Image (tube, helix red, strand yellow):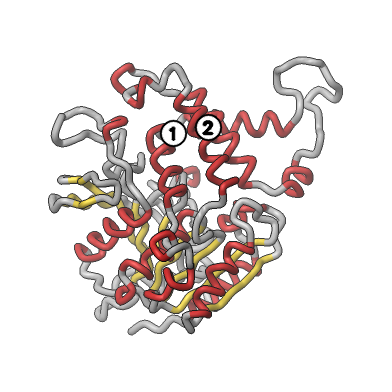
């Protein structure tokens, strides 16, 4: 077995669609673009494609680097590549930036073809199901009729689950990681606090801040700080920061004193420097709206009856935002429908962010599961 390697230098690709895409919100996109990346090679049978669905702040840039710069390493580079759990010697891996995103796909910061101006707040609401529909069109464009697997963590896991319900005959395997069949009221509440931080920023200008040459950085920073607290476990924060004071003693001010304050402000400032506020609003609402059981009287087994894929569901013991109990709901509903499903509950102290880390047991589970997926040479 070779040592795990990077996929190397990668180049984003762009696909334009001029066939109208009807959205669940009642809106419609007449002309839109998707930015994506691929790793590995599509085999002659076209049966080795794996779609990676990203979470809230993720993108199409899953693995590799741009121009060899380590600072541009893809967000799941530890998982995708030669000799890694999703082995690109075997699989053709695709990462897509979702509609409404801010990394090149059509979204609020892109140009509206109808007006020649940035979409801003006029970009329509999009849902998890809309993203899956757009991804399916990209698979059509790439000549992929059926995916060997679809995988995602958090919001990406919701997309993976939705693929199996919207296009059951097009997915052979689905890996749903650190996810849930719907958000709890507490999760929706956290999202609303984050959105209000952005909406109440004086620089927001009703979502058309591009026209004013400003960014609602204060609101976006606060939104990220709130979100980041929920991605970490109490134990992880205690181990990394504790109650450490930057000056060794209290100075009785509202400036940064505790190390955890410094860390949160750093994360907020960094996020506000590269992410789009309108995209944050759209994406958190898509999270809130996702609930496949809603159309089935709240009964998840009835909602998942359409699925035909073989599943892997993974949760993490310290993930309190997408707790293991939520993953087990998916498992029980699948078993009710006699679907093949493997479940792993990984002991990891990092909280929700565990799904992004190079945790040995987690990667071993994923690697063994992907090894079992049969594809043509």
Q: Nearer the viewer, residue 70 or 224?
A: 224
Residue 7 visible, this angle: no
Residue ID for mark 2: 270
The quadrant of the rendering that contains the N terminus is: bottom right
Query: Number of marks in the image?
Result: 2
**Residue placed at 59% from the left, 34% from the top?**
225
**Residue placed at 74% from the left, 31% from the top?**
259
- Placement of 142 over or under 27, stated as above or below: below
Side of 338 relative to 43 (left or right): right
Side of 373 relative to 137 (left or right): right
Q: Are marks 2 and 1 in contact (CB under 8 Å)?
A: yes
What is the crowding at mark 2: few (fewer than 14 residues within 10 Å), some, or many (at least 20)?
few
Side of 101 relative to 26 (left or right): right
Q: Secondary structure at mark 2?
A: helix
- Placement of 53 over or under 289, stated as above or below: below
- Placement of 196 over or under 328, stated as above or below: above
Residue ID for mark 1: 274
Residue 51 in percent (x, y) is at 37, 64
**Residue placed at 69% from the left, 56% from the top?**
318
Q: Secondary structure at mark 1?
A: loop
In this view, which residue lies farthest toward the front?
A: 297
Residue 50 in percent (x, y) is at 38, 68
Among the 4 quarters of the image, the one containing residue 360: bottom right
Among the 4 quarters of the image, the one containing residue 246: top right
Residue 302 in percent (x, y) is at 43, 72
Side of 231 relative to 96 (left or right): right
What is the crowding at mark 1: few (fewer than 14 residues within 10 Å), some, or many (at least 20)?
few
Among the 4 quarters of the image, the one containing residue 102: top left
Residue 33 visible, this angle: yes
Label 2 and label 1: CA atoms lie apart by 7 Å
In this view, which residue lies farthest toward the right?
A: 249
**Residue placed at 43% from the left, 54% from the top?**
290
């Amino acid at each position: 077995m070779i040592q795990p390697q990077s996929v190397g230098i990668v180049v984003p690709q762009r696909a334009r669609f001029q066939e109208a895409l009807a959205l669940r919100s009642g809106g419609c996109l007449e002309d839109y673009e998707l930015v994506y990346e691929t790793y590995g090679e599509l085999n002659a049978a076209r049966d080795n494609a794996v779609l990676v669905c990203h979470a809230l702040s993720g993108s199409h840039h899953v693995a590799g680097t741009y121009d060899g710069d380590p600072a541009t390493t893809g967000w799941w580079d530890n998982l995708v590549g030669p000799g890694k759990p999703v082995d690109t010697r075997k699989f053709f891996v695709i990462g897509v930036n979702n509609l409404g995103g801010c990394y090149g796909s059509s979204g609020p910061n892109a140009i509206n073809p109808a007006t020649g101006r940035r979409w801003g707040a006029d970009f329509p609401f999009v849902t998890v199901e809309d993203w899956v529909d757009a991804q399916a069109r990209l698979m059509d464009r790439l000549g992929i009729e059926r995916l060997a697997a679809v995988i995602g963590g958090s919001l990406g896991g919701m997309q993976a689950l939705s693929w199996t319900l919207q296009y059951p005959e097009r997915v052979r395997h689905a890996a749903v990681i650190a996810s849930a069949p719907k958000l709890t009221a507490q999760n929706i509440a956290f999202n609303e606090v984050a959105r209000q931080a952005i909406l109440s920023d004086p620089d927001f200008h009703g979502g058309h801040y591009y026209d004013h040459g400003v960014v609602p950085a204060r609101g976006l920073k606060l939104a990220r700080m709130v979100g980041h607290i929920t991605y970490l476990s109490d134990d992880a924060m205690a181990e990394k920061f504790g109650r450490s004071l930057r000056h060794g003693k209290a100075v009785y001010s509202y400036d940064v004193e505790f190390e955890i304050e410094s860390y949160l402000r750093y994360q907020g400032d960094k996020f506000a420097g590269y992410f789009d506020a309108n995209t944050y609003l759209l994406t958190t609402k898509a999270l809130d709206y996702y609930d496949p059981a809603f159309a089935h009287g709240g009964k998840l087994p009835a909602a998942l009856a359409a699925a035909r894929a073989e599943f892997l569901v993974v949760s993490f013991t310290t993930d309190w935002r997408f707790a293991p109990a939520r993953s087990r709901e998916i498992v029980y509903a699948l078993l009710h429908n006699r679907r093949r499903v493997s479940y792993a509950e990984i002991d990891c102290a990092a909280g929700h962010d565990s799904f992004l880390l190079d945790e040995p047991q987690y990667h071993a589970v994923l690697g063994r599961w992907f090894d079992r997926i049969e594809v043509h040479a």
